[in-house]
Image (tube, rainbow, N blue to C red):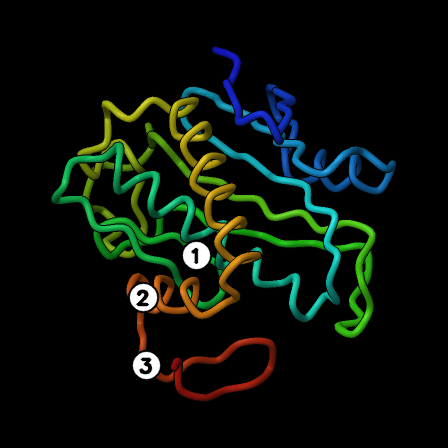
Amino acid sequence: MTEAVLPPLMSGLAVSGAIDPFVTACAKASLGCDAGLVVYNVSVDRLGSALVFAPEVPLAKAMAMLPLCGVGLQNSLGALAPPEVAVHLGWSGEIRVNGARCGRFRVAASTDDEGARPDWLVVGFEMPLFSAGQAPGDDVEETVLYEEGCVDVDPVTLIESWARHTLNWIARWEDEGSRPLHAEWRGIAHGLGDAIQFGGASGTFL
């Protein structure tokens, strides 16, 4: 696996095999690693990456990093994939490519108290690249990246691009607040206006 070249404020840690980069990032964060650590794992059929944050705001505000990282990935695929490929984000963290689920985002923090400032917060994503056991179109709700016209998208390049776009959005969020991020996210949100159920509650996705 080629080593990812990351922005100056970030550092990379490549893992391999069955090692989950999200779990690894959480473990490193709990041990006090520096913010900006990007843990990633690229295999033949899957890629995953996770970014460590050291928030300076309460958890309720720091959770903006979840949609922010999603927007960073959408922007990255928008730059690297063919123009006809549509990438959207779901309320519960799913990534959708051309309407079908193609991976997900996860988030974890050192505390679940929304009013407390967490010592660390980790946002990560995973995305299937290739499926040997399922023919294209067998499941219209699930897909893999390479079957959606993205076979020329290099996974390491995607991680590098995600890091850069995410860093740019962090700077914008710090300078301009959440309004630009919210506007960008609404433009790529899947199922806006639909009825949803999440965390034991139900309502309309606004």
Is residue 176 depicted above or below 204 in this figure?
above
Relative image position of residue 112 (x, y in whole percent): 78, 67
**C-alpha gap between disc 3 and disc 2:** 9 Å
Identify the residue at horizontal 77%, vertical 34% (top origin).
34
Q: Quadrant of residue 56?
A: bottom right
Marks 2 and 1, the one that precedes in the sequence: 1
Q: Secondary structure at mark 2?
A: loop
Mark 1 neighbour density, 10 Å: few (under 14) some (14–19) many (20 or more): many
Label drawn at residue 94: 1
Q: CA distance from mark 1 to mark 3?
A: 15 Å
Q: Residue furthest front?
A: 175
Q: Position of residue 168 (x, y in %)?
A: 46, 44
Q: 205 or 198: which is nearer to us?
A: 205
The number of callouts visible is 3
In this figure, which residue is indicated by the disc labeled 2? Answer: 190
Cβ atoms at labels 1 and 3 below 8 Å apart: no
